[in-house]
Amino acid sequence: MVALRIAAALALLCLAGPACAQKPEDTEQAGPAPPVVTPAAQPGGPPSDAVVLFGGKELGEWVSVKDKGPAGWAVEDGAMVVKLAAGNIETRRTFGSYQLHLEWREPATITGSGQLRGNSGVFLASTGPGDAGYELQILDPKDNPTYVNGQAASIYKQAPPLVNAGRPPGQWQVYDVVWTAPTFTPDGALKTPAKVTVLHNGVLVQNDFVLAGPTRFIGKPVYAAHGPSPIKLQAHAGGGPVSFRNIWVRPLD
């Protein structure tokens, strides 16, 4: 009886409109087929279409922000380690929108407090020298009180993380980032703002957050037109020897 009622209802729908003229295949897409990407054999490894920015041996994909010469950071035990005297480093290549994987570690013997406890940062797009760009904060996240939009996994001075998913100093932390670059009209006006989604150690901490502009230490952020730009890592005076490893990016433009 139930089947008969369903059939009767479908018959009435056909009489009431054009639904019966449609076929299941009318909403099926024949192509083009998505490109094939081979995932990494190990969790966190680069898939087949990724650009490996640091694989544990050398810094050829990175340059000094100051003079565009060789990056002056150290490579120790498969990780690159911040050298304050060398300053910030950035990628040789420029990127628009992308997926980024990056692993970082605070020293196990870290000292200091607040913003002086292992401070560094990932500038998701570098818009100029120094600290110009859009910063995802790196900082000791465990038992380290500071302003919430300056703690680890915050979009610095704009958005605190949804949760604190950090591990203790001395342990490796993971950022997985989806960055949507801002776009601008030909006359330089903002067309679409930047957006970012971040997972910290596999936990969602920034959910499609819309940025108000590049990072500013003092004052409100303001957009200025720019195109594809490098990804930058920060050498902060309060950072100490923060380490990085297993960095790769998948351009999404």
Image (cartoon, rainbow, N blue to C red):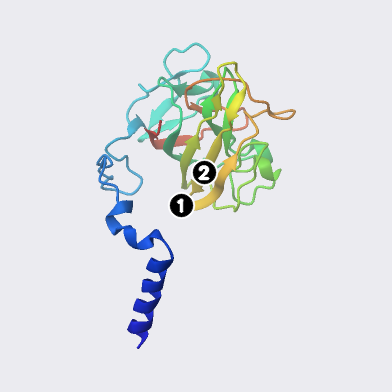
CA gap between label 1 and label 2 equals: 12 Å
Where is mark 1, residue-wise?
Answer: 202
The quarter of the picture where the C terminus appears is: top left
For the residues carrying marks 1 and 2, which lies nearer the camera in this image? 2
Dot 1 crowding, Cα within 10 Å, few <14, some 14–19, many 20+:
few
Disc 2 marks which residue?
197
The amino acid type of the residue labelled 1 equals Gly
Q: Give me the residue at 37% from left, 24% from top.
A: 59
Query: How busy is the neighbourhood of tag 2: few (under 14 within 10 Å), some, or many (20 plus)?
Result: some
User: In the visual, does 48 lie left or right of 109?
Assistant: left
* Image quadrant where residue 55 sits: top left
Q: Where in the figure is residue 232, as x and y percent of width and height?
A: 50, 26
For badge 2, the amino acid type reads: Thr
- Sequence order check, earlier mark of 1 and 2: 2
x and y, in percent, of residue 176 in the image: 45, 43
Residue 167 seen in the current view: no
Apparent side of residue 212 relative to residue 127 in the rendered image (left or right): right
Find out whether the residues at labels 1 and 2 contact each other: C-beta distance under 8 Å.
Answer: no
Query: Quick check: 230 above or below 138?
Result: above
SS assignment at label 1: loop
- Give me the residue at 60% from left, 18% from top: 188
Assign a secondary structure to mark 2. Answer: strand
Please identify the residue farthest to the right as the structure is shown: 219
Whether 170 is drawn above or below 132: the answer is below
